[in-house]
Image (tube, helix red, strand yellow):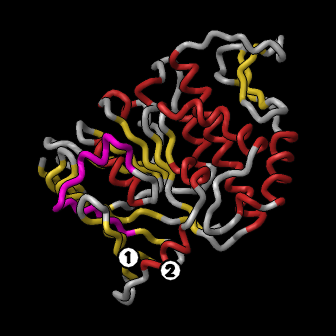
Amino acid sequence: MRRMILRCIKVRSFGGIRSFEADIYADVVTVFGRMGEMLMAAVRVLCGVPLTKTERRWLREDTVLEAELHGKRAYRVRLEGRELRMTVTDLATGADCTEDYRRATSRCEEECATYVFLRRSRGRYREQLCRYLEALPSASSDGLGVTEAFHRYTRRFVRDFSEEPLRPDKPYVLRLREDGRFAVCRREDPWHETVTLSETEAVLFSFLCYLHLVRFWKELRHTVDLHRESMPLIVEDFAEYIDESVPLLPYLHRLRRETRQMLLCLPRAQDAARLADWPSVQRVGADAETKDRLSRIRV
């Protein structure tokens, strides 16, 4: 499975962002500033994840969202207006390739949900494999979710799952039950699931579930389809909910192992310092006061 890499983004007249443009050169990108939420929403929809109802209110008739995405081919994806009319051109030839792009990046709804980690979706991550075992995922253009291979792989993934620590300083472990539900238990009592989690631990629980869902789809795609292109991974609602006593890098390094570009939203300035030891991270500002030489924004 090839990966798609974001190389440039332009946003005009979207929510509180009047005009924004940034060149992207790194595999790990942190987005910060008071407009970060809107910028991340723009990236999400350009990568094929629908906007929420609240985010759709940020659209105007003159909205333009544009990105350069490089995979097997280099594409310029442009979404315009309240309806987000899509036009995709081949950067090498300038030819319209909208339908080719749709085919190259098409995914079922369940897989698209793994492009983004959102704290508000935590219940979905914990229960997703259970739903795969109980019923067919929604139909998709590639038909993957309705094949027997999908169900055989899901059952094998659940069967072969190995428990792991939730955090290094607590005796809690993450387990995957036979019915496909993730659960947190005490290491000394793995069948007793009534564990009271702090806010930090609840977010870590959800994030680890998300990591395994990303791995699930990656390995499944390697098994049945090597020709589709995978979008960047987007992490929101994470760093700001993790207590400063818990290091962020071990969890984010786990996601980097998926060999996909990663965009991380850091709405608080102090969270950037927690990634100071991570080399080759590009910081992209979405704030009026930003002086980043790669970003130009008016709000």
Q: Which mark is residue 166?
A: none
What span is colored magenta in the figure? Answer: 51-68
- In percent of width and height, residue 124 lies at 59, 35
Residue under the point 14% across and 52% down: 18
Label 2 – label 1 distance at C-alpha: 9 Å
Does residue 1 lie above or below 174 as drawn?
below
Q: Is residue 292 above or below residue 253?
A: below
- The answer to whether 295 appears left or right of 149 in the picture is left
Q: Are marks 2 and 1 in contact (CB under 8 Å)?
A: yes
Q: Is residue 14 left or right of residue 100?
A: left
Q: Quick one: 149 or 28, which is closer to the camera? A: 149
Write the residue at 47% across / 47% down.
Answer: 234
Earlier in the chain: of badge 2 and badge 1, it is 1
Q: Which mark is residue 100?
A: 2
Q: Residues within 10 Å of mark 2 (few under 14, many from 20)?
A: few
Helix, strand or loop for disc 1: strand
In which image quadrant can residue 221 be found?
bottom right
Residue under label 1, please give it: 88
Percent x, y for residue 137?
68, 51
